[in-house]
Amino acid sequence: MINKFSLDKKKAKEILPKRPKNANKGTFGRALIIAGSRKMVGCCELAVSGAFRCGVGLVTLAFPDCIYDTVTLRLTENTFMPLPSHNGELSKECITELLNEVNNFDVVVFGCGLGRCSDIKEILGELILKSRKPLIIDADGLNALAEIKEALKSAECDILLTPHPGEMSRLIKRDVDYIEKNREKVVNEFCKEYNVNVLLKGNNTIISDSSATSVCINKTGNTGLSKGGSGDLLSGMIAGFTPSLKGDLFKAASLGAYIHGKTSEMVSEELTEFSTLPTDCSRTIGKVIKSIIESE
């Protein structure tokens, strides 16, 4: 039997992690975000900000060393892990270093703005097989995964995929129209076959746990989220909640999607849906969380 539900403020408040008074940054966990390329630098800032604004204590950004100067000038709160690059994107020469570090973190994000070179597929394959910590795969990570998705069946970590319909189309080799007409069925079948959590973006975003027995239908948000960078912010937000939710990617994704949608609703009241930007949504995360905390 499937437990299907949607979050409101009351349910979001029940999931929202508590913040003990005697805590320190280590209490709230460490996130590793593997992101960026020469052509896509802004995704790094959005993912990192999303993680921090959703409560994680420490964020390390792993990125191609060719964008070192740009990234380190734009970001201030996180630490940096520059990795070998080739033609503006991550090189597979980074695999050994990544694998030596990945299990020192409480959650890992892979894919935002990485590009589509063949090395990304090889790097991801090694992470899926060797990581023991919750792994969020987004954007170009999903494009790479489409060619190696059978590796998911050998994973020993909990995994969340965050595709939009186009990325889901590449994963299951069906057209977008089919996916949009069968959203719940597509997610249910994929979760069961590959034992992963899935967040399928779109109007009424669907989030399913890996057994497809719990499904959250997110009803917040508007077209203000239909901008490049919104998904990067969401991935970071989910990562930010994951450590404090004891690694529960389903809960983190459900809460992250709810708050992400609420930020766009709040921003667009002032700026309209036309002019809402992911950076505006990032700056509004705290206001939405405050409204949840103060709700009855």
Image (cartoon, grey):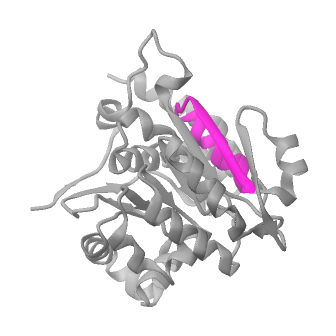
Quadrant housing residue 231: bottom right
Q: In the picture provided, is 288 more to the left or to the right than 249? A: right
User: Which residue appears farthest toward the right when viewing the image?
Assistant: 69
Quadrant housing residue 242: top left
Classify 42 as above or below 117.
Answer: above
Tell me the quarter of the image containing the C terminus.
top left
Q: In the picture provided, is 19 more to the left or to the right than 65? A: left
Q: Residue at x 61, y 70 (%)?
A: 140
Q: Nearer the viewer, residue 225 or 64?
A: 64
User: Which residue appears farthest toward the top when viewing the image?
Assistant: 22
Q: Is residue 246 magenta?
A: no
Residue 265: x percent and y percent? 54, 46
Question: Which span of residues is magenta-colored?
Answer: 43-63
Residue 190: x percent and y percent? 31, 75
Residue 273 appears in the picture as rendered: no
Q: Nearer the viewer, residue 64 or 257?
A: 64
Question: How many numbered marks have been drawn onto this rendered protein structure?
Answer: 0
Q: Residue at x 53, y 79 (%)?
A: 166
Q: In the picture provided, is 28 more to the left or to the right than 92? A: left
Q: Is residue 62 magenta?
A: yes
Classify 76 as above or below 234.
Answer: above
Q: Residue at x 47, y 41 (%)?
A: 106
Q: Nearer the viewer, residue 121 or 93?
A: 93
